[in-house]
Image (tube, rainbow, N blue to C red):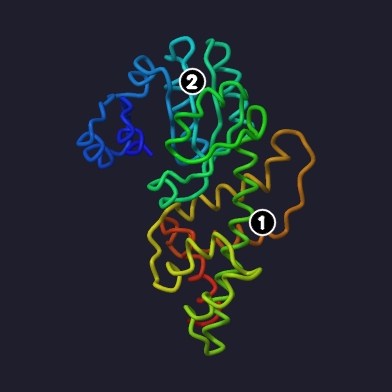
Amino acid sequence: MASRFLSAGYTVTIYARNPSKIPHLQSQGAHLADSPSHLALHSDVIFTMLGHPSDVRQIVSENLIPFLIPNTILIDHTSSHPVLAKQIYDTAREKNCWAVDAPVSGGDIGAKEGKLAILAGGNEDVVKWLNPLFGVLGKVTFVGGPGKGQSCKIANQIVVGANLLGLSEGLVFAEKAGLDKREFVEAVKGGAAGSMVMELFGERMIGRDFRPGGFTEYMVKDLGMGLDVGAEDGDDVVVLPGAALNKQMFTAMVANGDGKLGTQGLITVIERMNGK
């Protein structure tokens, strides 16, 4: 995502907790900030992409927002908690700044090709003003007020997880039935069984390519937020039996030591259950 901004001619300053992510961006012309506070003091638009809500609290709430200059816009692409997104929005407004919760869907391929689905919550006029920047990354959809982007991403993950489980079981069944898995996918992808998940991950599953576009441990996090979000913000809890089952399946992947694999690795759990 940072590479796309650099390629589009924007001046980009980066802060990365993992130094290995820095050199290739510097080689493309990125400037380096030595801390989140340095980044905050020298930027008018800040994008964050972190791992867990705890990371967002540490980096955004504790080390970015206190140092923001007035009228800065903070865009958090992390898949995080809706309640935390609302808190960040309110704290940013106290400093005469704006915050947009804008988690994305599309994985590593979508990021590289600028085809991410960006789910934006916050102030609609601010999101519209950001359209040229979002357009470098993909297609943005304003989905409502603060926290609504995160709620939309959780709903997205519920659907994606269900599709990954169905595709995993379909491939395992097809193999057990003596079908060629690639022929199976080719035969059904144009019908009701076809999906973007099949397009993105079908060949990866068949070819045992479990390199991550998104870590499995993050899917566990996202589904977990969907299951407890109502309890935390005081609303009625939504009954999600399918998401609860999916969370257990992805948790099994993590328990098997595969939390850093891509979510398409879910097929390994189904295979193990079938003695493979």
- Label 1: how many Cα within 10 Å (few below 14, some 14–19, many 20+): many
Residue 38 placement: quadrant: top left
Q: Which mark is residue 272?
A: none
Q: Hey, what amino acid is under mark 2?
A: Ile
Residue that badge 2 annotates? 73
Residue that badge 1 annotates? 243
Q: Quadrant of the N terminus?
A: top left
Number of residue marks: 2
The residue that appears at 35% across and 33% down in the rendered structure is 5
* SS type, badge 1: helix
Residue reaching furthest to the right? 236
Rendering coords of residue 124 (x, y %): 62, 25
- Label 2: how many Cα within 10 Å (few below 14, some 14–19, many 20+): many
* SS type, badge 2: strand
**Above or below 63: residue 22:** below
**Above or below 42: residue 276:** below
Rendering coords of residue 150 (x, y %): 60, 38
The residue that appears at 42% across and 62% down in the rendered structure is 257
The residue that appears at 58% across and 81% down in the rendered structure is 173
The residue that appears at 52% across and 14% down in the rendered structure is 97
Judged left or right of residue 268, residue 245 is: right
